[in-house]
Image: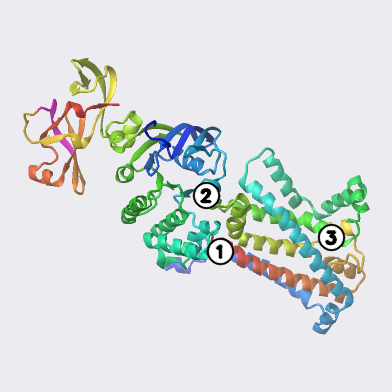
Amino acid sequence: MEDLPGYFNMIRIENISKNLGEFFLNDVTLDIEKGEYFVVLGPTGAGKTILLEAIAGIYSPDRGKILMDGRDITNIPPRSRNISMVYQDYMLFPHLTVEKNISFGLKLKKITTKEIKKKIDGISRMLNVRHLFHRFPGTLSGGEKQRIAIARAVVTEPKALLLDEPLSALDAQTREGLRYELKKIHSVTGITIIHVTHNFEEVFSLGDSVAVMNEGKIIQVGNPDDVFRRPNCEFIANFVGVENLFKGRSTVNNGTSDITINGIKIVSTACNSGDSVVSIRPEDILVSGNKIESSARNSFSGKITDVIDKGAIIKIVADCGIPISAIITRRSFDDMGLSRGMSAYFTFKASDVHFI
Amino acid sequence: MMAGKRISTIKVISIVVSLFLALFILVQIICVVTHTTFPALITSITSKEMQFAIELSLITSVASTILCIIISIPSAYALARYDFFGKNLISTMLDAPLALPPLVAGVGLLILFGTTSFGKALAEVGIVFVFTPLGIIIAQFFVNVPFMFRIMRGTFQGINPRYEHVAKTLGCTDAKAFWRVTLPLAKNGLLAGSIITWSKGIGEFGGALMVAGATRMKTETLPISLYLNMSCGELDLAIAAATILILISLGSLFIFERYGGFARVF
């Protein structure tokens, strides 16, 4: 901090709590940097939407404070925060045309009609919604509505853009397109984005940082890769879809741990003793027809019990005394001629075994 | 084959009953409007007394409807949007006039404005409700405000508060968000509520009778005129008043149905 005079986090959320009955926030603290694409991941009902609404100023928190650019904004109204929000269900004003929806925020500011026109033209070209200007929201598709909702939010040039499950209600193809547009908006405008989702894929494809939330609490913050590979609790591991999750007893020997699970011994480079839960990413497991000599400390043979076709990749589940899932490409699957009932070897490094 | 020819008794009975009900209503309306001849009807309607009744009815009903709108919008909004202490109690009280017979409501108003020091204080500054057209307005307001309130509450409850949230993040004050987003979205409910309140106001009798009395050419609205002329045998005038009331009711029903249906689109 000292070597960066004037440096501060763009948005700092300090110990925010808010109880709205069914939904609540419990002592949430987050730092979001300027220009960051920050994703908040959590299941339905985790309190993600209230978190965004608290940042936008819709609700004032029961406890804690929110700082923007070092200034306490906890008690200032939404209109003075210069933070835009896009809800999952778009919330386009049904009584206004697309054009009037997009220009809604600009008309509240003291700028000329000419300037308004220039700004809405620019954003509309970027999001490709120019041809929809005279339509009413009721006649548009989900993807079109979402693009207009984003245009309406971004055109006022806010300091931060809050997105509430922006891709969840869309079909796969539209979602892909919009994900690309979000990336583009982020890189072109450099705007700080806080994006809330329950889908881990969005974290990987968009996020610079991720915070995992459950039951109103932030349970892990980090870069997506870290959270994905080293979930700090069983909830996150289950939520982000870690398949190989095992409970066992661990003993530490010479800087490595031996974890005994159901009579099978797994070696990990991490040290932890006593009852533990470990995880191994399915893509970190090497599958081979014969036993291979390698530096990897863990190798088990087992009978393939399930083959799940996921398109370009195949998931193999085998019974090695413990159920091990591995993900391989379709090419390798075809080349090795694997099928259900066959035996294969499953090999992984001790450094890929994580305690959670 | 059997199924095609089989006649469902429940179908026949229910249709016949609904047919009789419709017929019963239609016959009544026809009875009223055909009781007198058309020229006699025209003469009555253009008579001085009937002109006065029409004018007074229009003025009082429009005034009471405006009063209902002014009071219902904020109270309906409060009960639709906010949680506060005593909300259920207030909600029940606001619905009460709906269950109260208008005559009883009228007695209550008469006592409030006629006997209490509050009423007397108002009378002293020139706001007299007892036996004046102002009393008609307050009676119509009191009896009909629950309709307006309930329609507006339902309308506001049907509008997602997130529209306002978005408007506020885009730069609106609370009041501006209400004015530019919520109120336009409530337009159809407001229209339907106003129509039904107005048409009920035109027909209001019991409450107005108690507070304002039935004085010819002074507090003589259409229903009061119908009552006065019926009781002294001026049948043509009574029928004229009844016919006008029927036309107003049917017209309002038509508009209400039309915009009530419209309201469901949003």
Place of residue B25 in the rendered image (x, y in percent of width and height, measured from the top left): 71, 68
Q: Nearer the viewer, mark 1 or mark 2?
A: 2
* Kind of element beneath mark 1: helix
Using a 10 Å C-alpha cutoff, classify the residue at mark 1 as few (fewer than 14 neighbours), some (14 to 19) or many (20 or more).
Answer: few
Location of mark 2 (residue): B169
Above-or-below relation of B79 to B234: above
Q: Nearer the viewer, mark 2 or mark 3?
A: 2
Which chain is mark 2 on? B
Q: At 38% from the left edge and 59% from the top edge, which residue is drawn?
A: A127
A305 drawn magenta: yes
The span picked out in magenta is A295-307
Q: Is residue A209 left or right of residue A51?
A: left
Q: Is residue A295 visible?
A: yes
Chain bearing tag 3 is B
Circle 3: element type: helix
Image location of residue A210, percent across then percent down: 35, 38
Say which of B197 and B42 sits in front.
B197
Do tag 1 and tag 2 residues touch (Cβ < 8 Å)? no
Q: Quadrant of the N terminus of chain B?
A: bottom left
Left or right: where does residue B78 sit relative to residue A98?
right
- What residue type is disc 3 on? Ile
Viewer-side label of 1, 3: 3
The relative height of residue A323 versus residue B65 in the rendered view (above or below) is: above
Q: Main secondary structure of the magenta part?
A: strand
Q: Which residue is mark 3?
A: B136
- Which numbered dot is residue B11? 1
The disc labelled 1 sits on which kind of residue?
A: Lys
Q: Secondary structure at mark 2?
A: helix
**Splitting the image into 4 quarters, where does residue A223 fall?**
top left
